[in-house]
Every structure is written in C-alpha cells, then in structure tokens.
Image: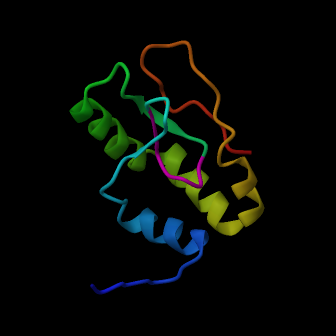
C-alpha cells in the first residue's frame, strides 16, 4: 500500500479551486450540497434535487461572480473561515446561493 499526502492550507486549496473547481460534491448529512467546504454557500438539496441537477448547480455556482468573490474574500482573509458552517436552512424546495459572506 502506498500512502500519499500533500499538505496544504485551506486558503491554498480554495485558491486552486478558483482556477479549477473540484470535481467532487460535498454533501452534508442533511442532503445539502456545499459549493466548497470553506464557504457557507449551498447550491443544491439532494433530498429534492436529482444528482445531475445538483451537479449542474454546483458547476454553475463555481461560474458565478458571487461564489468567486466570496472565495477570493476568504483567500484574502482566513478569519472568514469561522463562517464556513454558518449556512441557514431554507424553506424553499430548491436552495439557491443566497447566503452572504461578510
């Protein structure tokens, strides 16, 4: 067995994601799909959305000015990582990218 480990800081990983978003979905236990672990942004809800719709919402989120600006703010100020899990429950069936990053 070979174990590979490449240490990085969250800021570095998020910076790399700005150029090439990860090809994985981060699904929370309640079915929500986060745009990125260090961001409090939700783009889909797998309890209601089909997987392909969630994937399309994820890709669209990474193409949005709102997500890119939020990611850049976190890269510049790591103190904002404290808000990474500050997302709010939505009563809407389809969760839009509505959580603001200060």
Secondary structure mainly formed by the magenta segment: loop
Between residue 100 and residue 4, name the one nearer to us. Answer: 4
Residue 97, given in percent of the width and then of the height, sits at: 51, 33
Q: Residue at x 36, y 47 (%)?
A: 25
Residue 44, given in percent of the width and then of the height, sits at: 41, 31
Between residue 30 and residue 13, name the one nearer to us. Answer: 30
Above or below residue 64? Residue 12 is below
Please state if 52 lies on the left or on the right of 40 as rendered: left
Above or below residue 20? Residue 54 is above
Quarter of the image with the N terminus in it: bottom left
Please state if 77 lies on the left or on the right of 57 as rendered: right
Q: Which residues are magenta?
A: 32-39
Residue 53, given in percent of the width and then of the height, sits at: 26, 30
> Does the magenta run of residues contain 9?
no
Residue furthest to the left in view is: 52
> Which quadrant would residue 101 be assigned to in this image?
top right
> Does the magenta run of residues contain 36?
yes
Residue 2, given in percent of the width and then of the height, sits at: 29, 87
Q: Residue at x 49, y 35 (%)?
A: 29
Between residue 78 and residue 29, name the one nearer to us. Answer: 29
Above or below residue 98? Residue 70 is below
């Amino acid at each position: 067995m070979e174990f590979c480990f490449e240490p990085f800081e969250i800021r570095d990983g998020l910076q790399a994601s700005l150029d090439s978003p990860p090809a994985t979905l981060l699904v929370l236990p309640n079915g929500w799909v986060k745009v990125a672990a260090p961001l409090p942004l939700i783009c889909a809800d797998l309890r209601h959305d089909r997987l392909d719709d969630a994937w399309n919402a994820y890709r669209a989120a990474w193409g949005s000015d709102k997500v890119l600006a939020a990611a850049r703010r976190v890269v510049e100020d790591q103190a904002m990582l404290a808000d990474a899990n500050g997302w709010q429950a939505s009563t809407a069936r389809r969760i839009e990218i509505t959580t603001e990053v200060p």
